[in-house]
């Protein structure tokens, strides 16, 4: 009977070992599965007086082969990979918008200024004027389309945060449930259950980044990259979305635990959620702000030039483009209901950076919203002495007045492209002519020659008044009887908001007249100036041209997309190495399992032969006493 018992025990042990090997083979492609190994041990022997006789084999343990360090390394690399892949994917979409000739601004930008150049060749031509308006509207539409696409991406980030919060809560709840099932006794938990928990933690960290900390009782706590707890023992926190205090249309992540809701540090999150938020902060917002800055600078520069010209009706030009005011949003927790009204005062000083303005009860301060670096603020905030910061003027409301602790987010150019429009609808209102003309009297006897007449100050109330420059002698002149002024050939003469150059040697009594340009004039002086404004250095304090800024925007977005792609590719290599390190320990090797199966099959057959032998022995005994 002892032989039969030994063989039966061995048969059962090898059968279960074969089942474990089969389980390994069946899960060779199961993500997160850790191979299992059967540990054999001898059964307690029997003391027969003359010595101990063994009773065979038993299964002492089914061990889960796992390396905690390799698992932790894989967890860290997985969270970072998820962040970078999310960032790269969205950045590439923005890059495509600005680099593709079908969607970028460059083509229509060139067409618009080409149409201005064409108008300068035929300033009175109706077709050229109609074409300029059409190209202007096309350019405005493209600016709006691009800004709309960027706003759509912002909405996608919101939707991604909502969907991500739901998945985070589902994963956290399931991990907490498994922790509760383990109940402080990890040795009693099945290997498959532990694998399931590790896989869920990996997925959770893929959303938020962070770490998993094993406890002595066998439970695992999970924290976000910013250190906020997602799972503590058998309790799971709830992640939700809340409105940005400055921009209610934009969502942020927050965590609810023990009856309190805490906004998560948006810059500290990792995983997919961190990638979404980093994309919004480092790619989307700068691109939208720079697009708006170019739109504002182009429109302001072109409007200024257009206002210095005269249209076919004989009127001074007005705004060619229309613009919306910069955005200023108060914090949702402001103690007062005060508001700020913003206008662009100096386009060359615009940086596009969002600023946070704070009032301490007596003075205003400003800091960059992204870095917190202080920015200089001037003025008191009244209509006569507005606040000035970064090329923007702000007037503070007086009813109600601001209170200590008030905070406002100033977005100088974000969204400005969507508010761009063409203010001119009548082609005859295009101010292509120089509003004043100059000529020498036919009776002049000197060699003086007038040239370079241009408008220096379109706002001068005397600009269109007739003026006479009369020379007393070759070295002195008067303007409408005022003077005399010294004269040197080639010098610039200015008055009434215009300036001109006189060369040669005027004689005593020579006169030069400057007067209003007549209506329906074919003069192209102002159109020629407008055609070259795309090369005007009007940004960054007069150091960067409009064309340069447009090219810089494309380069900026493309560089950000490439950098994100390079980082994602590098992290993929790191993650693959971490995966290989984990698989070298915990992964299923089919060759190894095949060898184990063959070895256990032979052992199983041998145990069966023991049982057969025991049966023969038993039958011999029965036959002997029958």
Image: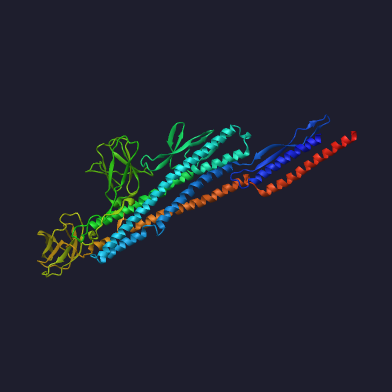
The residue depicted at 34 percent of the width and 53 percent of the height is: 144
Which color scheme is applied? rainbow
Q: Is residue 498 left or right of residue 296?
A: left
Residue 612 vs 523, above or below: the answer is: above
Q: Quadrant of residue 32?
A: top right
Q: Is residue 386 visible?
A: yes
Instruction: Compare residues 320 and 624 and report the one nearer the observer.
Output: 624
Residue at screen point 35% across, 41% down: 246
Vertical side of 561 occupied by 611: above or below = above
Work out which residue is located at the far front of the displayed protein and give it. Answer: 626
Residue at horizontal 11 percent and vertical 66 percent from the top = 510
Which is nearer the eye, 365 or 553?
Answer: 553
Question: Where is the C terminus found, in terms of image quarters?
Answer: top right
Residue at (54% x, 39% y) in the render: 212
In the rendered image, residue 337, in percent from the top left (x then y), is placed at 29, 37
Q: Nearer the viewer, residue 174 or 596?
A: 174
| Front position in the image: 607 or 336 | 607
Q: Position of residue 447 (x, y in %)?
A: 15, 70
Q: Quadrant of residue 60?
A: top right
Q: Residue 448 in the image: state x and y as whole percent.
A: 15, 68
Does residue 535 appear anywhere in the picture? Answer: no
Image coords of residue 490 (percent x, y) = 19, 65
The quarter of the picture where the N terminus appears is: top right
Total numbered badges shown on the rendered structure: 0
The image quarter in which residue 486 lies: bottom left
């Amino acid at each position: 009977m002892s032989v039969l018992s030994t063989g039966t025990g061995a048969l059962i042990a090898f059968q279960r070992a074969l089942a474990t090997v089969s389980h390994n083979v069946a899960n060779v492609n199961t993500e997160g599965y850790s191979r299992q190994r059967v540990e054999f041990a001898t059964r307690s022997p029997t003391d027969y007086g003359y010595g101990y006789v063994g009773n065979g084999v038993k299964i002492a343990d089914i061990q889960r082969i796992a390396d905690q360090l390799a698992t932790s390394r894989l967890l860290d690399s997985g969270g970072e990979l998820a962040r970078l892949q999310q960032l790269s994917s969205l950045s590439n979409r923005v890059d495509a918008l600005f680099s593709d000739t079908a969607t970028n601004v460059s083509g229509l930008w060139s067409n618009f200024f080409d149409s201005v150049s064409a108008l300068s060749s035929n300033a009175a031509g109706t077709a050229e004027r109609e074409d300029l308006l059409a190209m202007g509207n096309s350019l405005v539409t493209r600016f709006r389309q691009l800004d709309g696409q960027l706003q759509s991406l912002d909405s996608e980030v919101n939707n991604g945060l909502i969907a991500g919060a739901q998945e985070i809560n589902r994963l956290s709840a399931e991990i907490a449930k498994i922790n509760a099932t383990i109940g402080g006794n990890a040795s009693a938990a099945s290997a498959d259950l532990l694998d399931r928990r590790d896989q869920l933690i990996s997925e959770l960290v893929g959303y938020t980044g962070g770490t998993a900390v094993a406890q002595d009782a066998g439970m695992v706590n999970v924290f976000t990259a910013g250190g906020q707890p997602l799972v503590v023992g058998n309790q799971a926190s709830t992640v939700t979305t809340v409105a940005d205090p400055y921009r209610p249309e934009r969502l942020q992540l927050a965590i609810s635990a023990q009856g309190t809701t805490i906004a998560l540090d948006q810059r500290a999150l990792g995983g997919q959620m961190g990638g979404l938020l980093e994309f919004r902060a480092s790619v989307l917002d700068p691109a939208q702000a720079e697009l708006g800055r170019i739109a504002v600078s182009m429109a302001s520069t072109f409007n200024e030039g257009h206002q210095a010209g005269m249209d076919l009706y004989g009127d001074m030009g007005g705004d060619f483009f229309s613009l919306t005011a910069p955005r200023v949003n108060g914090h949702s927790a402001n103690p007062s209901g005060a508001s700020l009204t913003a206008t662009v005062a100096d386009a060359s000083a615009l940086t596009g950076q969002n600023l946070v303005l704070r009032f301490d009860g007596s003075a205003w301060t400003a800091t960059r919203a992204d870095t917190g670096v202080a920015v200089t603020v001037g003025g008191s905030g009244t209509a006569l002495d507005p606040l000035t910061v970064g090329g923007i003027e702000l007037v503070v409301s007086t009813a109600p007045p601001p209170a200590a602790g008030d905070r406002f987010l100033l977005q100088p150019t974000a969204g400005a492209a969507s508010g761009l429009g063409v203010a001119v609808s009548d082609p005859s209102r295009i101010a292509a002519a120089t509003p004043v003309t100059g000529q020498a009297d036919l009776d002049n006897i000197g060699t003086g020659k007038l040239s370079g007449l241009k408008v220096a100050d379109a706002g001068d109330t005397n600009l269109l008044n007739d003026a006479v420059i009369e020379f007393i002698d070759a070295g002195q002149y008067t303007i409408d009887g005022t003077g005399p002024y010294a004269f040197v050939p080639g010098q610039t003469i200015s008055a009434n908001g215009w300036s001109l150059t006189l060369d040669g040697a005027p004689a005593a009594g020579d006169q030069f007249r400057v007067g209003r340009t007549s209506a329906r004039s074919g003069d192209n002086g102002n159109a020629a100036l407008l055609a070259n404004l795309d090369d005007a250095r009007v940004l960054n304090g007069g150091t960067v041209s409009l064309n340069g800024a447009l090219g810089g925007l494309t380069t900026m977005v493309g560089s950000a997309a490439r950098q994100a792609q390079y980082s994602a590719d590098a992290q993929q290599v790191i993650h693959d190495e971490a995966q290989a390190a984990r698989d070298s320990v915990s992964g299923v090797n089919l060759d190894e399992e095949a060898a184990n199966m063959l070895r256990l099959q032979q052992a199983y057959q041998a145990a069966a032969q023991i049982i057969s032998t025991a049966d023969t022995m038993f039958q011999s005994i029965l036959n002997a006493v029958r």
